[in-house]
Image (spheres, rainbow, N blue to C red):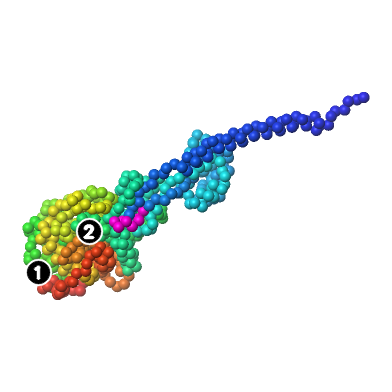
Amino acid sequence: MSLRARPYEDVWGPRRARIIAGVLGVLFTVVVGRAGYVAFNGPEQSAQAATASVERRADIVDRKGELLATSLAAWSLAADPRAIWDAGEVAQDIAKVLPGINVKDLTTRLSDRERQFVWIQRGLTPRQKQAVFDLGLEGLRFEEETRRVYPRGPLAGHFLGFTNVDGKGVEGAEAAFDARLKRGGEPVRLTLDANVQFALEDELEKAFVDFDMKGGAGIVLDAQTGAIRAIASWPQIDPNRPGDRTELAKPNRAINYLFELGSIYKPLTVAAAMEAGVLRTTDTFDVSEPLKIGAAMVRDPHKLENAKMATAADILAFSSNIGAVEIARRLGSEKQKAFLGQVGLLDRPTYDGPQAAAPLTPSEWDELTSATVSYGHGLAVSPLAFAMTYAPFANGGNYLSPVFLEPVDPAKIEKRQVMSASTARAVTDMMRQTVLVGTGMNAEAPGYEVAGKTGTAEKPGPDGYDPDRNITSFAAVFPASRPQFVVLVVLDEAEPRTGDARTAAYTAASIAGRVIARAAPLLDVKPVLDTSTAETPPSLRVTSDERTL
């Protein structure tokens, strides 16, 4: 009987079964091993992350406790590449629920088995976190963090600044007080008043409606203590979305921008001369003809009726450049420079808070420099630095640094006497007349006795000063009879949309007046009965209706 070979299936069946069983066993071992790794490493790490104590950054509030910045719990997604089986598949799955993910980049990073920790996305929303969790992917972990939020949106946005993704302050108060905020605990209380801040920012926003302007800045401060009650830069920014800032909105024009501010310097020129004993309120000057200084010619855009006998009050009220130069000549460049140094305009000021930009000072202080600086050209400073120079007019002659933190301890306020109380009073009276009958009439806020000065300065360019591009400003103290507060408004290239002139008398002065009318009640300033007759004194008469500087 011949032997027949067994069918193919019969020969290989048992062997194939053994091979398949072996392969399955290996796979089972790998899967179990991987599962064990994830079970004993991934979840454990996630549990640690979920229960770890997260340091909470302190809140920021205004002087009355209004919340301006706080921190909320948030989650971020990370991974351990060593616990990931298929990096490409994980990256693709994550991208399905987090659309901003770059799959190629994430695949590369998750494939690096030398790394134990990789950030995938910071600041997940609750919905995003749940969507990732529902994927059930290995090697992922959620890290508990905090997210900085600003409940009032753009209010005081430039001043508050913002934090980076790691919670570190990178601009504004968040950076200036970073160490204090990191410690957590009690809120950091600013001297800002949220209501006054809103009024200031709202008026700057309205200025854009009235004028086609490039930007603006405003400051309200308590001249008795140096406390800053409002400080704003326009266009606004929302610190909740710092990445959305336009190039025009990025600069903080109140603190970090330098301007040649024009004729608002003239009260300083007058005060310096009075303090030096070279100017009395009854002295008169002939401002009827232009002055030639070297190759330059100093002119006034209009003539006073009494141009041959103009007093210091006339020079301020109708903003005579010629008169300011004549006063500066009496003063002398050395004393002029010393006075401006005393009021903080020649060096970067130091104080506790966001630091103002250092001034841009003349390389030489010659006769021409002294002349142009007397009426606000040739010396560029930040609005914050300049606002502080008007505090002495309102507090009896003392210069003080800006203060940004409450409580303000009067005993710790550093004061520097830069002018006598009588000089401060005399110049304030002159500025009151400037508002009653001079270039500042549009700044009047009935009941609050505004005393101030307009400033219109041509902007410097590569080919010299450009008459078509102006900085317009108005600086004031109020109420004039018992001054307590300083207001400064600066508008960058403000062009009226109507037929009005594009000078400070029509732009910055009107905005400042509206700010004062709104801010004064919020600052508990009681209206006063203005008993002045507003009659033009004989020396304060102008032959033209123009009020240009």
Query: Which amino acid type is marked by label 1?
Result: Lys
Viewer-side label of 1, 2: 2
Q: Quadrant of residue 451?
A: bottom left
Residue at the limit of the structure toward the right, as seen here: 1
Q: Vertical placement of 34 versus 75: above or below?
A: above
| Residue nearest the viewer, comparing 513 with 346 | 513
Q: Is residue 162 visible?
A: yes
* Residue occupied by mark 2: 222
Spatial separation of the CA atoms under disc 1 and disc 2 = 39 Å
Instruction: Determine whether the residue tagged by mark 1 lies in a helix, strand or loop.
Output: helix
| Residue nearest the viewer, comparing 327 with 476 | 476
* Residue occupied by mark 1: 308
Instruction: Determine whether the residue tagged by mark 2 lies in a helix, strand or loop.
Output: strand
Place of residue 249 in the rendered image (x, y in percent of width and height, measured from the top left): 35, 57
Place of residue 135 in the rendered image (x, y in percent of width and height, measured from the top left): 57, 47
Place of residue 467 in the rendered image (x, y in percent of width and height, measured from the top left): 26, 63
Taking the image as shown, residue 241 lies to the left or right of residue 133, namely: left
Q: Is residue 68 magenta?
A: yes
Q: Quadrant of residue 235?
A: bottom left
Place of residue 41 in the rendered image (x, y in percent of width and height, measured from the top left): 52, 36
Q: How many marks?
A: 2
Residue at 16% across / 66% down in the picture?
A: 481
Q: Is residue 445 magenta?
A: no
Q: Which mark is residue 37?
A: none
Q: Residues within 10 Å of mark 2 (few under 14, many from 20)?
A: many
For the N terminus, the quadrant is top right
| Residue nearest the viewer, comparing 290 with 324 | 324
* Residue span colored magenta: 62-69
